Image (cartoon, helix red, strand yellow):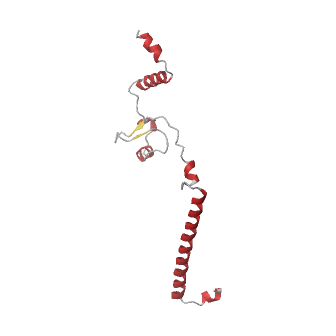
Amino acid sequence: MKPHDIESMSMDELWSLREFVASLLARKMSAEKARLDERLLQLDPDGVPQHVKKMGHARRPYPQVFPKYRNPAEPSETWSGRGKQPRWLTAQLKSGKRLDDFRIQPSSNRGAVLRKVMTLINKKIQPRVISVFGL
């Protein structure tokens, strides 16, 4: 079909031509996809694409991060200080409050003691602890 043929076509003829081309493209694309899928299965008989196999590694475990900031209006809303600031905190900061106004005060040195105990457990000095108690 020549360009001047298209220019001389009516609106209805152009619309039907467009629908014909769209359906033809859809059929050819699905046939090509089926052909490529078949070829992929021949290359990898397990049926699992290669890029999916590479994603099998799990992320390394990160330690739990405790919250450092609390919303006084809604105490269940907390933020650890990592990542994007929550909406409640952003709104409060825009109203003139300071970030330290929302900081959670440590109740005791319980966290430091717990870290020390976990360090001792991880270093496996339990035999020394048992010998102190005479067991």
Query: Looking at the image, which is closer to me, 42 or 114?
Result: 42
Instruction: Judge left or right: residue 15 versus residue 135.
Output: right
Query: Looking at the image, which is closer to me, 24 or 104?
Result: 24
Instruction: Judge left or right: residue 53 versus residue 66.
Output: right
Query: Looking at the image, which is closer to me, 45 or 110?
Result: 45
Q: Position of residue 65 (x, y in %)?
A: 46, 35
Q: Position of residue 126 (x, y in %)?
A: 46, 18
Q: Position of residue 75 (x, y in %)?
A: 34, 39
Q: Position of residue 76 (x, y in %)?
A: 35, 40
* Quarter of the figure with the N terminus: bottom right
Which residue is pictured at 38% across the width and 40% down the height?
71
* Quarter of the figure with the C terminus: top left
Q: Is residue 111 above or below residue 58?
A: above
* Quarter-of-image position of residue 57: top right
Query: Looking at the image, which is closer to me, 49 or 123?
Result: 49
Which residue is pictured at 55% across the width and 71% down the height?
31
Q: Is residue 128 above or below residue 40?
A: above
Q: Total marks drawn?
A: 0
Which residue is pictured at 34% across the width and 42% down the height?
74
